[in-house]
């Protein structure tokens, strides 16, 4: 996620809020120093797996971010749509249970 954010800031350095978020994250002691530099040789994958764990709850999601690279409408230029999909049956079941559907 950090590398994706770094690349987005490189793409649009005038996006102040995005640059501020990146700066805040990089200032955290939790960020490994090896992750602070942008590695442009690493592939930018179209999806990302996010693993969340709290107590006995263990969830894995596949995330995608959709952007419009050549919009015909300026309002669409900065639109980003993020979708999270359960990566496994246990996560799907936990989501149904947490939503009150099972």
Image: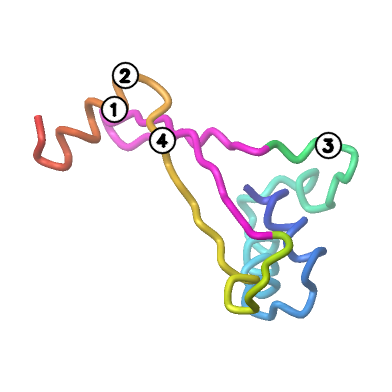
Task: For label 4, count other residues whose C-alpha is less than 10 Å away and answer few (under 14), some (14-19) or many (20+).
Answer: few
Between the residue at mark 2 and the residue at mark 4, the CA separation in whole angstroms equals 11 Å
Residue 42 numbered mark, or none:
3
Taking the image as shown, residue 30 lies to the left or right of residue 97, namely right
Q: Residue 22: x and y, percent?
A: 68, 65
Between the residue at mark 2 and the residue at mark 3, the CA separation in whole angstroms equals 30 Å
Between the residue at mark 3 and the residue at mark 4, the CA separation in whole angstroms equals 24 Å
Closer to the camera in the image, 76 or 51:
76
Q: In the image, which residues are magenta?
A: 46-68
Q: Residue 82: x and y, percent?
A: 49, 52
Residue at horizontal 62 percent and vertical 47 percent from the top: 1
67 falls in the magenta region: yes
Residue at horizontal 31 percent and vertical 19 percent from the top: 89
Q: Are marks 2 and 4 in contact (CB under 8 Å)?
A: no
Which residue is identified by label 2? 89
Counting residues from the start of the chain, the first of labels 2 and 3 encountered is 3
Q: Are marks 1 and 2 in contact (CB under 8 Å)?
A: yes
Taking the view exactly as shown, the residue that stands out farthest to the top is 89
What is the magenta segment's predominant secondary structure?
Answer: strand
Residue at horizontal 49 percent and vertical 34 percent from the top: 62
Taking the view exactly as shown, the residue that stands out farthest to the front is 72
Between the residue at mark 3 and the residue at mark 1, the CA separation in whole angstroms equals 30 Å
Closer to the camera in the image, 66 or 7:
66
Counting residues from the start of the chain, the first of labels 3 and 4 encountered is 3
Residue 92 numbered mark, or none:
1
Residue 85 numbered mark, or none:
4
Q: Residue 39: x and y, percent?
A: 86, 44
Q: Are marks 2 and 3 in contact (CB under 8 Å)?
A: no
- 86 shown above or below 89: below
- 39 shown above or below 8: above
């Amino acid at each position: 996620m950090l590398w994706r954010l770094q690349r987005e800031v490189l793409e649009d350095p005038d996006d102040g809020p995005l640059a501020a978020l990146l700066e805040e994250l990089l200032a955290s002691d939790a960020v490994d120093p090896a992750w602070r530099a942008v590695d442009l040789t690493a592939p930018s994958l179209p999806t990302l797996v996010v693993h969340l764990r709290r107590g006995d709850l263990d969830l894995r999601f596949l995330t995608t971010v959709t952007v419009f690279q050549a919009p015909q409408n300026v309002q669409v230029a900065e639109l980003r749509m993020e979708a999270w999909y359960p990566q496994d049956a246990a996560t799907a079941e936990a989501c149904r249970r947490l939503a009150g559907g099972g």
